[in-house]
Amino acid sequence: MLQCLRNRLITPFLTLQQLDLNNNELVEIPLEITFLKKLQSINLAFNEIEDFPPVLAQLTQLSNLNLSENYLSGLSFDIVNLQKLKTLNLGWNEFEEFPLEVLGLGKLENLYLNENKLDKLPKEIAELPCLSYLNLRWNEFEAFPLELAYIPNLKKLKLSENWINVLPPEIEHMEKIEQLYLSKTNLHDIPAELAELQNLRVLDLSANQLDFFPEEILDLANLERLNLANNHIKNLPDISDLSSLQSLELYNNFIKELPQGIGHLKQLKKLSLNENELTYLPASISELNNLEYLSLEQNQLQTIPVELSRLRNLKQINLAGNFFSKQQKEQIKALFTHVPQVNFSNQVDLNTT
């Protein structure tokens, strides 16, 4: 296709709507691309583009523009000609400042600026009326940008791998947020205002410095996925009110026991508890009728409640790195004959007879 553009053999492609030119070592874009008047999506990722190609501004039907994995440090004002643009991917570039030209894209819904060098946002970002997804992962923010709290229709935010340290009370204004990713942000505490985010369905607080389960989470009745893995949590409160949970990841903490109320999480499909300090399991886990995946690797278990055989939808259970005797392993296998994957690899045997 690229050769056709360069040789002006473009007539067969005049009605083309999608064009993928990723990983072509492009430094600039052939002028002939402007003949593709119906183009709606173009992928220019993994090239060597240093300046915004002005020819792109003539593709006024574009709704999806991917310029990730290039060497861009700024944009041209010409980009405002792309008034139908809904998705703009500028991830993995060299931006040190937020490109203000983006503010002129009134229909923009999805903006990727991950893996750049940003440390602040303009207050005018709140004037993007349609912006619903913003990816700022792995930049250089040293505090939570307060401007994020006032983007009117923001539903999904990725801010992981920024050293923000503290969540401000202003997050209570993020009323429409549904997915919030804050992994590896050096959080030690969670503000009470988190409980105001009643539309939240996905919350990722993994790989932080939390040494307790934030009880504000217990008020998030619509939460479906919760990730608190790789923290320092020792105790769990009664989590039975999180009745919408489908995935709960608590691996690599210091949890010694599970609350009996865990059996009330009737929608739960995935439960990851590996690399904790569990010595026993409550029989109430057997009430998780929709559970499909259960990981208990690297704990201190010596027995499994026989009631767990009631988990008829279970597809995989991981038990490696515990302290079951050979006899106990055989008994456990007998409990889970209906489970396709029962993993005992790397087991520590207490009894070799």
Image (cartoon, grey):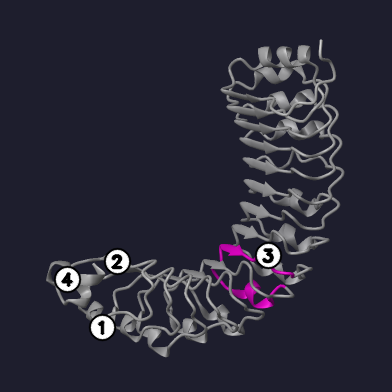
Q: N-terminal of the two: label 3 or label 2? A: 2
**Regarding mark 1 in the picture, which secondary structure is present there?**
helix
Residue nearer the viewer, 162 or 80: 162
Residue 212 appears in the rendering: yes
Marks 3 & 4, CB-CB < 8 Å contact: no
Q: Is residue 22 toward the left or the right of residue 11 in the image?
A: right
Residue type beneath disc 4: Leu
Marks 4 & 1, CB-CB < 8 Å contact: no
For disc 4, the neighbor class at 10 Å (few under 14, some 14 to 19, many from 20) is some
> Circle 1 is placed at which residue position?
31
The quadrant of the picture occupied by the C terminus is top right
Residue type beneath disc 2: Leu
Q: Nearer the viewer, mark 1 or mark 3?
A: 1
Distance Cα–Cα, label 1 vs label 3? 38 Å
Please tell me in which quadrant of the rendered image residue 347 appears: top right
Distance Cα–Cα, label 2 vs label 1? 15 Å
Residue type beneath disc 3: Glu
**Is 156 a magenta residue?**
yes
Q: N-terminal of the two: label 4 or label 1? A: 4
> Circle 3 is placed at which residue position?
161
For disc 2, the neighbor class at 10 Å (few under 14, some 14 to 19, many from 20) is some
